[in-house]
Structure formats: C-alpha cells, structure tokens
Image (spheres, grey):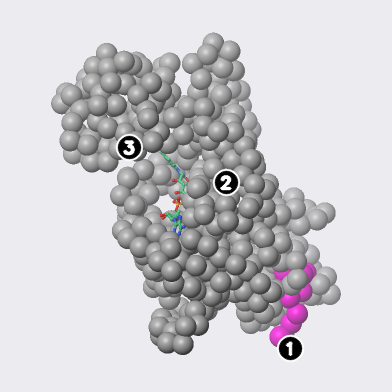
Amino acid sequence: MHPQQFTADPPSTDGTPRTYDVIIAGCGPTGAMLAAELRLHDVRVLIVEQETEPASAVRIVGLHIRSLELMAMRGLLDRILPHGRKRPASAFFAAIPKPAPTGLDSRYAYLLGIPQPVIERLLEERAIELGAQVRRGRAVAGFEQDDEGVTVDLADGEQLRSRYLVGCDGGRSTVRKLLGVGFPGEPARTECLMGEMEVGVPQEEIAAKVAEIRETHQRFWLRPAGVGVYSVLVPAAGVSDRAEPPTLDDFTHQLRAIAGTDFGVHSPRWLSRFGDATRLADRYRVGRVLLAGDAAHIHPPIGGQGLNLGVQDAFNLGWKLAARIRGWAPEALLDTYQAERRPVAEAVLDNTRAQTELLSTEPGAQAVRRLFTELMDFDEVNLHLLEKITAIGIRYDFGAGPDLLGRRLPDMDIKQGHLYGLLHRGRGVLLDRTERLTVGGWSDRVDHLAESTAALEVPCLLLRPDGHVAWIGDDQQDLDYHLARWFGKPAH
Ligand SMILES: Cc1cc2nc3c(=O)[nH]c(=O)nc-3n(C[C@H](O)[C@H](O)[C@H](O)COP(=O)(O)OP(=O)(O)OC[C@H]3O[C@@H](n4cnc5c(N)ncnc54)[C@H](O)[C@@H]3O)c2cc1C
C-alpha cells in the first residue's frame, strides 16, 4: 500500500517560508530515487530541479545487478524491464571481452541497457506517484542551517524551509560548494565527445572499420542507436573548446583523423562532452545537509557505474533519514550513511582509475591489459572484478561476525513467493527459521517472517530496509540489542 499523497502546502501569505521535512536539490536519478524512498515512510519531500524539462542527451546506461536488485526490492523492476535490453553480465571491466563468470549469486544476473532519460523519467514518476512534489525550473542558490532546520534560498528569491537538505545536484553541486566541502581528486586528463547522428554509409562498412580501430583505440565507437542513427564516441583532444558545446564539425574532424573517413555523419540528435575527472567529497554530511550521487563523487564512465552508485547512495540514505524524521533513529544512524557509502565510492573511483589506465594506447598499459586478459580466464578473478563493478560484493563493516554480516542478501524463494517481494515497503525484515523469535515492540518498523523453508544457512537474520544483513543468530536478547541498534527504541 502506498503512503498517503500529501498535497502542496498553500502559498504562504504571511511571508514565512513553506516547510517540508526534506528538500532535495536535483531531480536526476539520485534525487528521484531518494524522494521515493523517503515517501515510503510518509516524509514530506520537495525536489527542486533547475531544468524545466528532463534531460534529453540519450546516454545508454546500464543498470548493474545490485541496482536491478534494488528495483526488485521496491517492486519497480517489472516497470523498468520493458524499456531496456537484457545483456550478459560480462565484459564490464575495461571492456575486456570475457564471458560472465560462473557462480554469480543473483536472480538478476544481467545488465539492463536503458537510456538514462527513460530511467530518470520512471524514477521521477514513481516519486511523484508516492507523493513527492517536484518543482522544475527552480534552482537552489543558497541555504543557511540552524539547530532545527535549513532555510533554502531559490534563485528566483523564494525561501523554503526544511528539516534536512540533500544535494543530489550533480558533479558541479551548488550544495557541496556552499557547504565548503572539499572535492579533492584529479582533474580530467582526457575528454571525449559523444553524440547521436545519422550516417551516410552502409552498416557493414562501419562495423568492419570500427572493429579494426577498436583493437587499439578504446575511446572510439559508432554503435547503432535506432533506425539509421548511430551513437558516436571520439576523443575530444585537439578540437574541443571546453567553454563551447561541441559541433558536428568537431565529430567529422575526429572521425577523419582516426578512421580516415567521417562515415557521412549528419543530422545530429544531440552532442555532448565528458571527461575523466575523478573526485570524492571529503564529507557526505554537514549537520542537516547531506550529499549523494555525483554531488559526492565523480569518475570516468568506464564500467558504467555512476548512476548505479548514486541510486545506491539514495537507497542507503532514504530509510535512515526517514527514521530521523519519524523520530525513531538511533543517535548514530545517520552517520552510518557516510561511514558505509564513502568507502564504496572510494573503491569505485579506484577501479575506474585502474580501468582508465588499461585503455591507454601506451605499450606498457597495453601489456598490462594483455596480462589482465589472461588473468581473467581464472573464474575467481573474473568474478571478483565483476562483483566490484556490479556492487554485489559490498560488505559494510557492522563489526565482527560471519561473512554474510554486512553483505546484501540475494533474493531467494520463500513460502510466499520470493524474499524481495517482502521489501516493497522499505521496512526491516526478521527472517526467522527457528520460528520462535519475535520483533516485539519494533513491529511498526520491522516485519517478522517465520520461514523454515528459506534457503538460508543460518537460523535467523535481520535485514535492514536496504537489504543488508544487520544481524545473524538465534538468541532473542541478542536480537533485541541489534533491533535497538538499527531501529531505535521499541514503540512499546
Ligand atoms: C557518457 C556517459 C556515460 C555514462 N554511462 C553510465 C552508465 O552506463 N552507468 C552508470 O551508472 N552511469 C553512467 N554515467 C554516469 C551517470 O550519467 C551519472 O553518474 C548520473 O547521472 C548521476 O546522477 P545524479 O542524479 O547524481 O546527478 P545528475 O544526473 O547530474 O543530476 C543532477 C540534477 O541536479 C540538477 N541541478 C544541478 N544544480 C542544481 C541546483 N542548484 N538546483 C536544483 N537542481 C540542480 C541538474 O539539472 C540535474 O537534473 C555516464 C556518464 C556519462 C557522461
């Protein structure tokens, strides 16, 4: 059941700002996902988005296994699947062509190729459906926080008030800059031009030439992206003036320089430029203001991880921030957001740094690439790299305990169907094979599933709303301690 949709506050007549529980700056995938997660817990959310229309640049992004699992946990996957194309879970690491490793422990072990504007639209629609408000064409320009909340200034002069502000406003985040949070890392070393356009030569001719060039140039492609339309990627070096949007001439110049032909490209749909700058925010939270998604981390798109990482930040933060607003969050819960997610981003930055090196045409880098290509024939190496990119290998540090503690629990069959079906409402779940434990006074936040048939190798476990294992055991007293650790004081 969906929470009640709340209606917009009436315009204030006495000059006091409209108030919300949470204001989110930016309606990209991270902001929209966060809003939906908060609405599961009846939090009053406003998204302020500077663009009047959703983005049009059609980056085909891939939803990796963990993101597909999150969508399944909230009942969203069936809505998303018809818009994407399932591809094998392989060849993600530095585009080294290897088959998917055996032993991938997920019901959703594939990549879903889907245009970014489509996933953004679906997430925004879902947030609105659950009752979030989205105001487009309005930009967050300033804010001031105090003990009770944050006063947010919009660029048009309007003032709003909320208990928390979350900057999901992308790599150039205004919120992060206004917070004064450092964003150290490396500036872009290489930039690429990307766009969609029509071509003037037959498909076979393009395919043969592209295959030949990609043996040495990884930052180059022409891929079919619709009837007669191709997605084109070329290096920007030499033609790119960062201050100006790229032109079709920039593309034809680069295509001729690399391929000896411009393939007769014409009629561009859209053209864009991106770089491989790699940066990580020093802090994810300052008081009542938080950062998530590209606002907190940027890195090269190799491996297709940025959107996935942002959506997963939102999934980690949503229930914790909601708990804070609902009044039951244990004191340190909100701090676990940075403690858990910043190291994950750090690791992603590192794997993109490594992959970028492997794309270089330098002889040394090419030799390392050949070595990696050999090593990935070992299934364990292949699996290790794939678990990194798809985020299913993450283990949060919840203290000493079995290996499963802190990891995500894969979906599994249970009496009622499948486990992820029980997580749609964003609540905790006690999965109890002993069938004698209880969630007692936490039953308003945690569901109890007495389930002797579940394919678990442990007697009982507590799942957080984000599907990570928060406790394993069979002792009621120990369970109560951990229920309080993650879900605060019992209601009765
Ligand atoms: C070529 C390319 C390919 C990529 N491929 C992949 C891929 O395959 N897989 C993947 O996971 N990722 C991929 N990415 C990365 C992905 O696009 C980003 O990581 C993702 O868009 C980040 O989402 P976000 O919501 O955090 O930020 P954004 O998408 O940048 O959204 C931020 C939003 O905030 C708004 N905003 C900015 N400032 C303000 C303000 N002051 N007030 C209000 N609103 C504001 C912006 O208009 C925007 O809508 C790719 C990136 C590129 C460039």
Q: Which mark is residue 245?
A: 3
Q: Is residue 11 left or right of residue 367?
A: left
CA distance separating discs 3 and 1 = 60 Å
| Start-end of magenta stretch | 482-492
**Where in the figure is residue 294, as x and y percent of width and height?**
52, 49
In the depicted view, which residue is nearer to us: 196 or 95? 196
- Residue 26 screen position, x and y as percent: 45, 59
User: Is any atom of residue 96 visible in this view?
Assistant: no
The residue under label 1 is which amino acid type?
Answer: His
Name the residue located 56 percent from the left edge and 17 percent from the top edge. Answer: 365
- The residue under the point 49% across, 16% down is 361
Mark in front: 2 vs 3:
3
Q: Which mark is residue 297?
A: 2
Q: Which quadrant would residue 411 be assigned to in this image? A: bottom right
Spatial CA distance of label 2 from label 3 is 24 Å
Dot placed on the residue nearer the N-terminal end, 3 or 1: 3
* Image quarter of the C terminus: bottom right
Query: In the rendering, at what x and y percent does residue 286 appear?
Result: 67, 60
Residue under label 1, please give it: 492
Magenta span includes 487: yes
